Amino acid sequence: MTEQFTAEEIAARFAALVPSVKLVNALSDEVSPYIDTLDDLRRNVDHLTQMRVADYWTNEDFTAVDAAIITGENRISEVEDNGATRPPTHKMVRVEAARRLRALAGTYTPEERETWAAQVDEAKALVADENATAPLVTALAAADNITPVTMAGYILGHNSAFATASGKILAAQRAILAMDPLPADFATRAEWTA
């Protein structure tokens, strides 16, 4: 049974093909046939192919779509036969460092992490003067049924450990970014765990 669409709906469906055509063409225009483009190519060529055979089209010009399907299928074959691994970029190394920093922060929410600087400031004030005003640390201490000074010690200890671990990640990032060329195994290098 043929689905019935208005002219506006058909035009919108046709317009929705344009991003897939552009992506297939862009990936096919890359100098090297990189393995990491294969899923995107397949998904978009499949989408174009499925949409092309729909039975509700009227008089749309499929020249660009048909060309993208052929170009994409050819590129898929080329990648499958001769695909290369994309050389690492500085951005890829920075993304890996960011992933490691997020993992280091663990289950703490961004909102909670926004309080860390205030917690550290109050903790330092309490270590210097146990009568210092520290509403955030005092509230946290009360929730854990400990003294604010004890909580301050925990906060400063966690802050020091976090700074040390963050420093190692950022130092590894800097060391890897200084390598020329960037190593293909940048994400598993020993520098991250040194």
Image: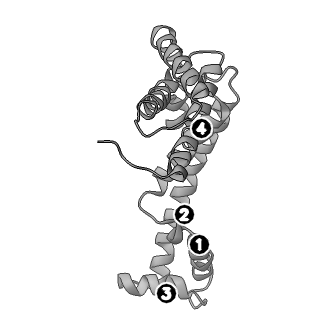
Q: Would residue 158 appear left or right of 133 to someone viewing this image?
A: left
Front in this rendered view, residue 175 or 69? 69
Question: Which residue does the numbered mark 1 point to in the structure image?
Answer: 120
Residue depicted at x 65% and y 29%: 89
Task: Work out whether mark 4 precedes mark 2 in sequence or the reverse, and give the earlier one.
Answer: 4
Q: Would residue 34 appear left or right of 31 to someone viewing this image?
A: left
Residue depicted at x 49% and y 17%: 73
Give the SS element for disc 3: helix
Amino acid on which the number 4 mark rests in the picture: Val
Give the SS element for disc 4: helix
Residue depicted at x 60% and y 35%: 93
**Residue 159 badge:** 2
Q: CA distance from mark 4 to mark 2?
A: 50 Å
Front in this rendered view, residue 171 or 131? 171
Q: x%, y% of residue 23?
A: 59, 32
**Residue 18 badge:** 4
